[in-house]
Image (cartoon, rainbow, N blue to C red):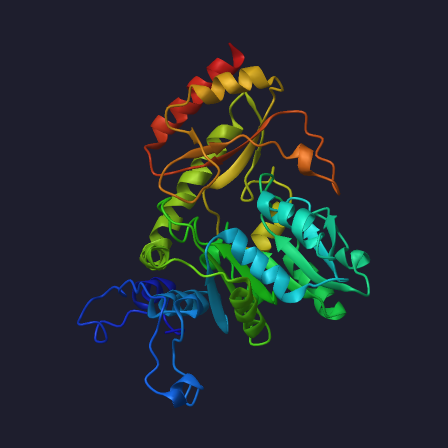
Amino acid sequence: MTDKKTSTLLTHVSADPKKYGGAVNIPVHRASTIIFNSYEEFEGRPRPAFVYGRAGTPTSAAFEQAIAELEGAAGSVSTCSGLSAIVTALTAFAGSGDHVLIPDNAYGPNRRFCEKTLGHYGVEVEFYAPMTPDIGKLFRPNTKVLFIEAPGSLTFEVCDIDAFVKAAKMAKITTIMDNSWSTPLLLRPLDHGIDVSVMSATKYISGHSDAMLGVVSGTEETYSKLKNAALHLGYCAGSEELYIGLRGLRTLHIRLKEHEARGLEMATWLAAQPAVKRVLHPALPSCPGHENWKKHFKGACSTFGIILHETDKKKFARMLDGFTLFHMGASWGGYESLCFPEQPGPSRTAAKWDEPGLSLRLHIGFEDLDDLKNDLSEGFKRLSA
């Protein structure tokens, strides 16, 4: 179905009603043991489609086929979370004695995995400034992976993806990109020469804050390594989560359009509020890498950051604790609005974060926008009281 428009692809990809008695949705296959029909089949002559639940089921195959078609990938591997997808990708291409480059604005759990686990097993991890103008200067003879996250977590910088990929290709370094913010509808990393695309399908793919799901997609050269890494690590997605992920895909294009419009309206409104020092939304000129976003991306979602003039955390807490709609939560991409007050400064090592104001990540859900503005306005009043 790769020749179909996105909306048609999302509506019908992986569906097989004739195979399942006319049901338009792929059934949930709750399977661990899968029976072999003969000893020859057990020995792989011919190799059966499914051999054990962890290695794959019809439900995981349907989800992975759908993601692969959206990504333009040779294949995709579903995992149990966004972090497990990142771990799969990194361990597939980096081992003891290797050097990997991770952006200084990487997703927090990714950063902690690299510091605590990759480093423990002999991988040299170097964090780089996300807006590094010449990434090639950081390459070493043992550099095996260049990890890209654009926009970056919490601070939303957008690097020059094409320039990074060009430098990595020349040095024969594998590139991995976390594309959770964009999904393949707004950016297809493999189209830009990225070797591996990683997504937390917990976010916009599932879309309803009720599933833990990750997925990693690769080219002809990288897919088999990704699949083997997931198998060796013991990662697999749950049957219910795969079903939820497939269901979420059917409406992804509609939800993202609404998220984009709502996010832009709220970001523009926030930019005019006296309490707000700066809005970190890639579609606005105030965000570092805005020109790169215009060059690479087809649109934006509804997750972005703001920096306040205020530096007093007691006042900050008073603002946050009084919200009625913007609940504090660590995720995003669902139907409800969220705020996340983690500050980027303490984790930065390569590019010092010296903004004096307090930061807040926002996800704009599907509530009435006037109600959301009122919730924020009342919060700003508490902040300045």
Q: Nearer the viewer, residue 239 or 265?
A: 239
Give percent across and percent down for residue 172: 73, 70
Looking at the picture, how far across and down is residue 285, in whole percent?
Answer: 59, 40
The residue sitting at 38% across, 57% down in the picture is 238
Task: Single out the residue that lies furthest toward the front.
Answer: 39
Q: Looking at the image, can residue 298 be seen?
A: no
In the picture, the quarter occupied by the N terminus is bottom left
Give the side of residue 315 with respect to residue 345, left or right: left
For residue 275, what is the image quadrant? top right
Q: Is residue 81 above or below residue 51?
A: above
Residue 25 occupies quadrant: bottom left
**Residue in the foreground of this view, choosing between 243 and 363:** 243
- Give coordinates of residue 167: x percent, y percent: 73, 64
| Residue depicted at 52% across the width and 16% down the height | 383
One can see residue 61 in this view: yes
330 sits to left or right of 131? left
Residue 110, placed above or below residue 219: above
Residue that lies at the very extreme toward the top in this rendered image: 385
Q: Nearer the viewer, residue 205 or 224?
A: 224
